[in-house]
Amino acid sequence: MTVQPDHDRDQQRRRQEAIAEAESLGLKVTPEGLDRAKAKLEAATARHTAENRAEWLRRLGITDAAA
Amino acid sequence: MSDQQIRLVLDVTAVLAYARGSDDVGETITQVRENGDAFTAGVLTLAAARSAARTDFAGLVDALTAHPAWQSAALDTGEWRPLAATFDTLHRQVTDTPDLTEMSAAEALVLSFRGNAVNVLTAQPQVYAVNVLTAQPQVYAVMGDDPPIIEI
């Protein structure tokens, strides 16, 4: 995979801004913690397939229109 | 109006964890912010957390709802049926006594179904389990093997 320096720099900048903002809000965050959170979010988001959604709604007894 | 998309819904256990200074919650909502997305919690959840919290909760709610990635979201009257069905399913599976945690979990799930790829953040995944009283609890089983649940 080709490395995209601009993309990496943008990601680094967003990360630094997010940490600075979080600290200004009194939140304690670390790059490692954000990496863990990112991995969890990505893993959960990957589960959002049409099949899974239909299964979740079926199990909860609700229809897609109602949801 | 913000064009941020809600990608995360906190249930009452996540809000309470935030109130207790959980790094996991802070880092998760910071990552949501870094992604350019938003998070929310329902009004039932905020009220349930207020009921359970022993800290200065007004200040907490102000801080949480003032977060740059916060977006308000509330169920409509017409959504009482999916809310009731979800609550009923979660309640049947967990305890004999309905409680605010289950109602908050139901609210979080129904809010999550409104959007595209919206996950629920919780500190008590067992609330979403099929039956915690069995010898081998199947965490998340109410939602199947691939639930939209993130455990902190």
Image (cartoon, rainbow, N blue to C red):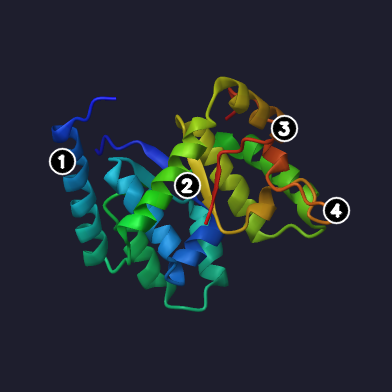
In the depicted structure, whether residue A1 falls above or below residue A39: above
Q: Nearer the viewer, mark 4 or mark 1?
A: 1
Percent x, y of residue B142 = 72, 40
Badge 1 is on which residue? A9
Observer able to see residue B73: no
Instruction: Using a 10 Å C-alpha cutoff, classify the residue at mark 4 as few (fewer than 14 neighbours), some (14 to 19) or many (20 or more).
Output: few
User: Which element is circle 2 on?
Assistant: strand
Percent x, y of residue A4 = 19, 30
The residue drawn where x is 57% and y is 34% is B78
Label 4 vs 2, first from the N-terminus: 2
Co-location on one chain, circles 3 and 1: yes
Q: Residue furthest right?
A: B135
User: Which element is circle 3 on?
Assistant: helix
Badge 3 is on which residue? A59
Badge 4 is on which residue? B134
Horizontally, residue A30 falls left or right of residue A61, namely left
Q: Foreground: B38 or B66?
A: B38
Co-location on one chain, circles 2 and 1: no
Q: Foreground: A24 or A36?
A: A36
